[in-house]
Amino acid sequence: KINSGIPKDDRYVDDYLKDLEKTRGLLIQWLEDFKSKFAEFSAEIQPTVDQVENGLSNYREKIGSAMLGVNIQKAINARKEDGSVLEYGLKYHLDNFNRKVESGIPKDTRFVDDYLKDLEKTQGLLIQWLEDFKSKFAEFPQEIQPTVTQVETGLALYREKIGSAMLGVNIQKAIDARKADGSVLEYGLKYHLDNFNSKIASGIPKDDRYVDDYLKDLEKTRGLLIQWLEDFKSKFAEFSAEIQPTVDQVENGLSNYREKIGGAMLGVNIQKAINARKEDGSVLEYGLKYHLDNFNSKIESGIPKDNRYVDDYLKDLEKTQGLLIQWLEDFKSKFADHPQEIQPTVDQVETGLANYKKKIGGAMLGVNIQKAIDARKADGSVLEYGLKYHLDNFNSKIASGIPKDNRYVDDYLKDLEKTRGLLIQWLEDFKAKFADHPQEIQPTVTQVEDGFALYKQKIGGAMLGVNIQKAINARKADGSVLEYGLKYHLDNFVNKINSGIPKDDRYVDDYLKDLEKTRGLLIQWLEDFKAKFADHPQEIQPTVTQVEDGFALYKQKIGGAMLGVNIQKAINARKADGSVLEYGLKYHLDNFVNKINSGIPKDDRYVDDYLKD
């Protein structure tokens, strides 16, 4: 087909090339599969590979370039129905585009919009077509260059003759745009900027009743102008020189506002924040003056002499102090850029807070410490009846000593341990709550810690011994891994080892399994035991030694024997036992060696099965 050449009749060229291209694709795929399948035998397959590659090379040499020319021309002529972005092919649209650019922008402004829209749409399609065309023939830049140059010349002519004119039109449209056109300004820039400048020039009204509306209106317009300017600069970011006059106009207006209105508005806003009540969004119910005056007056009057009123007095002051701190933070945050202007108000509030700290702080701290000491469970404490009650009981119980009657030891120790746990928790909470006042709480801390020291001295050691023995005696029902406690299982383990492996093979398996299971439980028990009493290695050593002696005896008398048993079991194991061999090693190895020794069958019909087997 290649040697016969491309048909002279154009009607058959398409089918000729499609057929060749399809066969070429199949040959390439076949060759890849063939080379992959016989990758280890490159020398043996080389003649066949050469045959196919010669055919493919012949295709590239005789058909490739001709086919490329055909495909390039088809892409140029392609219409929308052929998958192009251009309705009637490149020539039609490019000629129309160039002609329209050459004719220039209409003098009648009624037709300018449609003229520019139409050109801009065609420009977009030509750019997209050119990107697709260059991408499709990326490996053939030289062959497509004449067409690329034609399109790029048309686009360059458009930029040169239409681009700047269109930019001016678009800038003016953005300036004139109203809300209905997508602008943030209801009636276009000129209207709002002129109004803004005129309002600033007229000055703040002398009548206070109108100041608020005047400033709100200006502030609203200023916000819209700032937003409009950001959108405008962003839209024409690449044309800063062209938009600068408009930018200057708006920025002059904003600068004029800052200069003439900014300071006055700041003062108004500061005063409004000072006067603001809860209904205006303040944390203070009736404005700063009311609450700060009351706060200062209450501090000056001093803590009531009658204890019945101290709590309410301090609570009320503390609540107001919290609100003033929050108000001050909000106020400073709101006017962070104007520290000098707000300083007098800040000083007023901080003076009141400093006065509170100096005159009330210490007294209130003492009250709060005592309240924490006296607090019961109903007040949020972990102690049912307050510190004194539980600490006195704790110390008294320790002083009375461990009961002589063993029946009561457990309850005695449990009760002490429970109280000790609650006292530890209480002390942590107490120290955390008054972390900034270590000196003031030290006497109470010392009282509680003295109780702990007494417990450690008189009870600690005795309780450790009790707990160790309890862990040794513990059964499964008590949370141990050993069903009946350590002594029972360790004695059984040692006795079983000393009795030796049964002489009757029928019992060896069960004997070893039982020992292995008990050994595993003892190992787990010992790990738990050592972990539980990690801080007391000396006290638990006798028990640890007992268990480890049992392990050493097992290793000495059973370990080696068990290894031999396990090796033999692995040799004898069948598929049913988890081996890969159906009937154990001996059966399969004997068969394997016998088959090899019998030699390859002389009858070819049986060779395949023999070798596979």
Image (cartoon, rainbow, N blue to C red):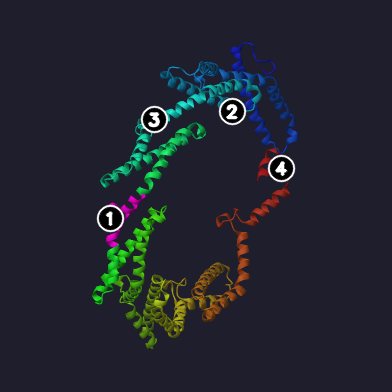
- CA distance separating discs 4 and 2: 65 Å
Q: Residue at the spot x=41%, y=53% of the render?
A: 338
Magenta region? 266-291
Residue under label 2, please give it: 135
Residue 272 sits inside the magenta stretch: yes
Q: Which mark is residue 177?
A: 3
Q: Residue furthest right?
A: 43
Residue under label 1, please give it: 278
Dominant secondary structure of the magenta stretch?
helix
Q: Of residues 4 and 548, which is closer to you in this image?
A: 4
Q: Nearer the viewer, mark 4 or mark 2?
A: 2
Three-letter amino acid code of the residue under disc 1:
Lys
Confirm whether residue 275 shows in the render.
Answer: yes
Q: Nearer the viewer, mark 2 or mark 3?
A: 3
- CA distance separating discs 2 and 1: 67 Å
Three-letter amino acid code of the residue under disc 3:
Ala
> To which quarter of the image does residue 328 belong?
bottom left
What SS does tag 4 mark? Answer: loop
Q: Residues within 10 Å of mark 4 (few under 14, many from 20)?
A: few
Q: Earlier in the sequence, mark 3 or mark 4?
A: 3
Q: Of residues 574 and 32, which is closer to you in this image?
A: 32
Three-letter amino acid code of the residue under disc 2:
Ser
What SS does tag 2 mark? Answer: helix
Position of residue 32 measured from the top left corner of the image (x, y, whole percent): 66, 32
Q: Residue furthest top?
A: 9
Q: Residues within 10 Å of mark 1 (few under 14, many from 20)?
A: few
